[in-house]
């Protein structure tokens, strides 16, 4: 049985208290954040964390992000807090930025996938913050999707993946940002961007100067020691995704050409693009700018999957601002099948 708590209209602390009790009891609660929905459990309780891995079907070496509601809570999780963490937290927390820091012994190794570092963030969502405060626990929460599927940006997506499998889902409506948090490793000098996300790289660099970009951010990588999560298949719908990037008019022509080609092969084709119109079996307009595309991306992948298309042709966008996070997700969803037109 899964209790669904409707909190689309306004914050209801009495209802959040029910969910907080589940967390304290070691049960799982899916909740909204500003990025995507999280599948939460007590980060310091090995059994809760074990349930998160089992429920998602997540490989044990892919570590979780721990969510906190005050900066002081960071001292319970991380053994060293460099000045960059303080500066960035002051500027961007609560918000879509995750720090990787050396972990304290109190954090179970199952939570960190066996690593000696822990990933921590403070989400900018009142429901999430209240849940953390009322449960009095740091909450480990990966995105609330079955491992390998697109991340959930609404409670409906969580219902599709986990109804009947977890204790509670808090429905806070659609998430604002739509892609996950930016993951920044603060144990290296300069810090390293491990995953582009809801906070653009440019904004971080404006505050602390140049940072390193992990090679996996832009391309395929096979053996990754620092961010084990990178090696797994991600965001993948059942359909084969093909990303087409380059000059807008050439991309348009190419998509039209491919629709025709796959139709002749008897395949069902879906298209996701920024504007225009395509005579495909399904067409989703992702929006006018990188913020809109980020917000619509995962929902679009899930919708096209539901329509049963065989191929998804996705228009690439510029890797600036949220575009870097969008393209990182799209390329992974495509298994790096991309066509670049200059
Ligand atoms: O926006 C978000 O970050 C969402 C919401 C729910 O907060 N959560 C999320 O969690 O995206 P998840 O588990 O889907 O992604 C966590 C990412 C993975 O890429 C993982 O490899 C990385 O963070 N990560 C976690 N701990 C790490 C560590 N100690 N070192 C390096 N990477 C780590
Ligand atoms: Mg995820």
Image (tube, grey):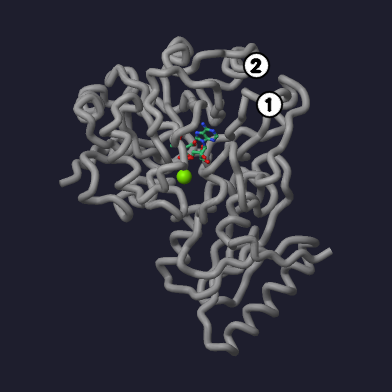
Q: Where residue 171 sits in the image (x, y, percent)?
A: 31, 40
Please indicate, yes or no, whether residue 323 appears anywhere in the rendered image: no
For the point 45% across and 34% down, the residue is 114
Is 231 above or below relative to 283?
Answer: above
Q: In the visual, does 10 lie left or right of 69? A: left
- Secondary structure at badge 1 equals loop
The answer to whether residue 208 shows anywhere in this view is yes
Which residue of the protein is positioned furthest toward the right in this rendering?
342
Quadrant into which the C terminus falls: bottom right
Residue named by callout 1: 191
Residue at 31%, 27% (x, y): give it. 42
- Label 2 and label 1: CA atoms lie apart by 9 Å
Badge 1 density bin: few <14, some 14–19, many ≥20, Cα 10 Å: some
> Toward the viewer: 93 or 174?
93
Place of residue 16 in the rendered image (x, y in percent of width and height, measured from the top left): 25, 27
**Looking at the image, which is closer to me, 92 or 78?**
78
Identify the residue at image location x=50%, y=54%.
235
Please state the horizontal and vertical placement of residue 260, each as a whole percent of the image: 64, 83
The image quarter in which residue 279 lies: bottom right
- Residue matched to label 2: 84
Tell me whether circle 2 and circle 1 mark residues in contact (CB < 8 Å): yes
Q: Which mark is residue 139?
A: none
Tell which circle, 2 or 1, labels the residue nearer the N-terminal end: 2
Residue 170: x and y in percent read: 29, 37
Say which element carries label 2.
helix
Up the image or down, 97 lies above or below 305; here it is above
Say whether mark 1 is within 8 Å of ligand 1: no
């Amino acid at each position: 049985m899964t209790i669904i708590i409707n909190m689309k209209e306004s914050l209801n602390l009495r209802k959040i208290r029910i969910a907080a009790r589940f967390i304290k009891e070691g049960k799982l609660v899916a909740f909204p954040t500003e990025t995507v929905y999280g599948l939460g459990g007590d980060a310091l309780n090995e059994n809760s964390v074990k349930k998160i891995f089992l429920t998602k079907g997540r490989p044990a070496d892919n570590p979780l992000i721990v969510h906190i509601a005050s900066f002081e809570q960071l001292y319970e999780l991380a053994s060293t807090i460099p000045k960059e963490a303080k500066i960035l937290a002051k500027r961007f927390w609560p918000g879509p930025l995750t720090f990787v820091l050396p972990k304290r012994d109190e954090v179970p190794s199952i939570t960190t996938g066996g690593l000696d570092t822990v990933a921590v963030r403070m989400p900018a969502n009142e429901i999430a913050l209240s849940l953390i405060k009322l449960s009095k626990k740091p909450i480990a929460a990966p995105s609330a999707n079955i491992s390998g599927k697109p991340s959930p940006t609404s409670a409906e997506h969580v219902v599709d993946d986990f109804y009947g499998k977890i204790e509670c889902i808090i429905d806070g409506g659609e998430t604002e940002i739509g892609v996950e948090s930016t993951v920044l490793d603060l144990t290296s000098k300069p810090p390293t961007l491990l995953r582009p996300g809801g906070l653009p790289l440019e904004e971080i660099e404006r505050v602390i100067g140049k940072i390193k970009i992990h090679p996996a951010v832009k391309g395929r990588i096979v053996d990754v020691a620092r961010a084990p999560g990178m090696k797994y298949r991600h965001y993948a719908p059942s359909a084969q995704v093909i990303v087409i990037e380059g000059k807008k008019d050439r991309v348009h022509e190419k998509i039209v050409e491919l629709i025709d080609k796959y139709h002749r092969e008897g395949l069902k084709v879906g298209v996701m693009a920024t504007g225009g119109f395509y005579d495909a079996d399904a067409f989703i307009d992702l929006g006018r700018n990188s913020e809109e595309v980020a917000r619509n991306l995962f929902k679009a992948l899930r919708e096209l999957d539901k329509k049963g298309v065989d191929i998804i042709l996705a228009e690439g966008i510029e890797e600036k601002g949220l575009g870097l996070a969008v393209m990182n997700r799209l390329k992974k969803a495509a298994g790096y099948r991309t066509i670049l037109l200059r």
